[in-house]
Image (spheres, rainbow, N blue to C red):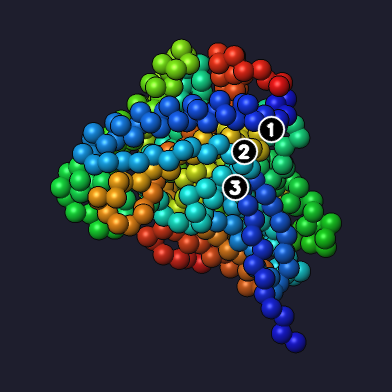
Amino acid sequence: MNAFKPLTDNQLDVVKEIGNIGAGHAATAMSQLLNRKVDMFVPSVRQVSLEEMTEIAGDKETEIASVFLRITGELPGSMFYILPPQQASHYLTLLTGAEMGTLEELAGSEMAVSTLLELGNILSGSYLSALADFTGLTIQPTVPSLAIDMAGAIIGDGLLEISQFSDYAIVIDTLFSEGSTAMNTPVKGHVLLLPDPVSYDTLFNVLGVSHND
Amino acid sequence: MTELATIIKVGIAEWDIVKAPNLIRTSGLGSCVGVVLYDDRQGMAGLAHIMLPDSAMAKHDPFPVGKYADTAVMELYRQMVQQGAGKYNVKAKLAGGAQMFQFQAANDMMRIGSRNINAIREQLQTLRIPIVAEDIGGTKGRTIEFDPGTMRLNIRTVHKGVIDI
């Protein structure tokens, strides 16, 4: 049915702008919450195979903390918020004052889990409401869930919906890092937005971009 | 003569077949299930990294046969027999089918691990392939590696170390 059709440059620009707007708002929300400067990089839009997608945060066996949620409404899709272990513990320390050592400790702590979920909630909420304002579409995030485990296993599970339609996903990948004042380690996280294949028709329609140009 | 063992890696929704002394491996199984079919007399093993239970779910065509439980098990078995595996000497080991995300609202996709397992069991039963060992369910991702020389399936889980089944 949905044969995989590469996006044109024009369409890619539009999708990238979506990422820019969403991530810009998310960065502001995160900066306020953490009371730190958070830098969001220019998003990259890539069309990747499912296999490449599971390696987007590094090796498939790399441990990550990830908040995942589905987007429902007129623009269905999936959203991931991915943090390397050190960054997740660092944010927890900033937000709660608690020192968390390993990811295992972190996974076992109810407060840590709900803090990370809340961080994911705020980030995705601001990302998606900016997107809703810009497109005029109704978009609702589901309740987020958290997993701390191998990147490949986590991302693979988030791809289940998309994988019924296609062997490829279009991913809007925004890297973020804390401003230079905080830590000197250049640890970065990802915000990934993966619209379901059906969402592209809607998106290009409301933004007045032709499908065939 | 010493032959150097190669590890063949199987990606998501893919499958492959190896002969001893080579090993076959797939990384990062979440709700996905790794199905190993093997023939101990031939020292041959096939591995499929299955994502979804039923090819009737496919809303695209063509789709990779390795993605769905029904098509993956069938194709893997067929190809192994074609490459010399004994029709009645193929056995299975399974790993995976976890639930990675815990606090998800009611959503069919979130129970996909157990649905994958059920679909695979059904297909194996149809083909009369016995399941010799399995490590399934739970909430943790797995990386698995099978050695068709020893028929051991090595399973690595984050924080829980390594087991052989």
Q: Chain of mark 1?
A: A
Q: Chain of mark 3?
A: A
A104 shown above or below A201: below
Res A180 seen here: yes
User: Mark 3: which secondary structure?
Assistant: helix
Which residue is disc 2 drawn over? Answer: A47
- Provide residue B36's location: percent of width, then percent of height: 64, 57
A183 shown above or below A21: below
Give yes or no for contact between labels 1 and 2 (Cβ–Cβ under 8 Å). yes
Labels 3 and 1 positioned on one and the same chain: yes
Amino acid type assigned to the residue bearing label 1 in the image: Pro
Q: Earlier in the sequence, mark 3 or mark 2?
A: 2
On the picture, is B43 further left or further right than A134? right
Q: CA distance from mark 1 to mark 2?
A: 8 Å
| Mark 2 nearby-residue class (10 Å; few <14, some 14–19, many ≥20) | some
Residue occupying the point 17% across, 44% down:
A96
Residue occupying the point 67% across, 63% down:
B8
- Provide residue B55's location: percent of width, then percent of height: 68, 34
B127 shown above or below B38: above
Tell me the number on the disc at residue A52: 3
Tell me the number on the disc at residue A6: 1
Amino acid type assigned to the residue bearing label 3 in the image: Glu
